[in-house]
Image: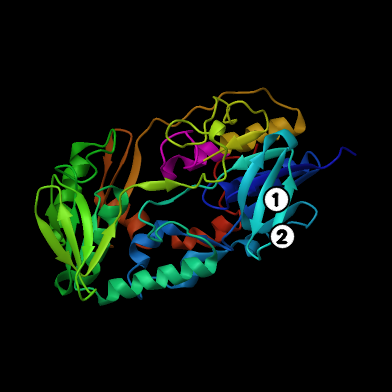
Amino acid sequence: MASTKTVIILGAGWAGLPLAHKLLKYTSLKTSLKVILISPNSHFFWNVAATRALIPGMIPDESIFIPIATGFRHYSADTFEFILGRATGIQSSSNSVAVLANNGESRIFHYHHLVIATGSSMASGLPLKPIGTHEEMLTAWHDLQAKVNDAKDIIVAGAGPTGVEVAGELAAKFGKLKKITLIMHGDVPLESSGDLLSSVQTTLDTDLQKLGVKLIRKTRVEAVNVSSDGKTQILSLGNGSTLATDLYLPMHGIQLNNSFVTDSFLDSRGNVDLNGMMRVVGTENIWAIGDVSNAGPKQLTVTDNQINYLASALDAALTGNGPDVPYKPINKTMIFLSLGKKYATGQIGNWRLWGVLVSYVKGRNLFIDSANGYVGGKHLRHAPM
């Protein structure tokens, strides 16, 4: 029998976790394989729902924090291992990765193939994307919920998808009980979002105002100071004005989780640099996927396409079957936005979606009913390899 091949996947988020399931479900039937999944967080964060769940009492923790180990318990220990820890370095010459385990132990793991799928974090450090261990994540999450609960005045900065949804969800829940303000650099929401239709932007603008969100246009937050009593944040805007608020939520920008990746593997913007086959440039057996890479837009809607390609490419590399086929990115615009349960809009290609459709599909429960199945590998997209 052929010797066992080891695939190490760094990161158990939207890309790394389903990729592990695909390899275990299909490739392991064709060749002797072990998948090692490494993540500092023991729970998958269903952050599609984070924009609503940050409001206390709206969504319970157990609905958005799903134990990862439970989702993989049907695989044998010979084929799968889940390690709680974070990568600290890659040594490609020895096909090894250094890992600092959550218990403080330093370990070295050897691989035949390595996949970097560590994703990104919010540039502000807000926990709308995973941070640290599950315990660290919960502490930050509950702290944010408490601040949202106590604040009477909340300012959201950044009119990208996350900022727009947060402002909309807050206004939909609290109405006139809290003052909600959205600061945007452009003239309309999502102005810098590529091929987005102006009708989608106009719909968002109108719906936010219907919900009572105050829109401040064509400026950005330049500085943040705290009042002498420590209770108020003072924002200095680029237009020369200042605003005082109980809670400031900067929702713009991401930070790539690439601190362990050698500079030679990164492009000029800090992305893991890939060739047309999703291999890290200059390597044959190191791959990357998702936000941390330059495989495509940093959007959840393109993740399935990347997962299916990389699963097939790894299958071919591990079994020796199948030609090398270049990755074909999705160029179609796909976006779905919900502002509470009543208002929503979206776009596929050049079509603006009816708000009632997006509200029904996404806005009702933000796909929470799919979370356990996703973590358990029951909702893998498209046909097996």
Residue labelled with disc 1: 36
CA–CA distance in space, label 1 to label 2: 15 Å
Q: What residue type is labelled 1?
A: Ile
For marks 1 and 2, the one nearer the N-term is 1
Q: Is residue 289 within the magenta segment?
A: no
In the rendered image, the quadrant that contains the N terminus is top right
Q: Please give the range of residues in magenta.
A: 290-307
Residue 241 appears left or right of 174: left
Rendered image: mark on residue 124: none
334, 153: nearer the viewer: 153
| In this view, 170 is above or below 328 | below
118, 211: nearer the viewer: 118
| In this view, 190 is above or below 165 | above
Image depth: mark 1 or mark 2 in front: 1
Residue name at image x 20 percent, y 52 percent? 221
Q: Can residue 58 be seen in this view?
A: no
Q: Where is residue 222 in the image (x, y as percent from the top left)?
A: 20, 50
Q: Which amino acid does label 2 sit on?
A: His
364, 120: nearer the viewer: 120
Residue at the front extreme? 228
Residue name at image x 33 percent, y 34 percent? 349
Q: Position of residue 213 (x, y in %)?
A: 15, 60
In the rendered image, the quadrant that contains the C terminus is top right
Rendered image: mark on residue 74: 2
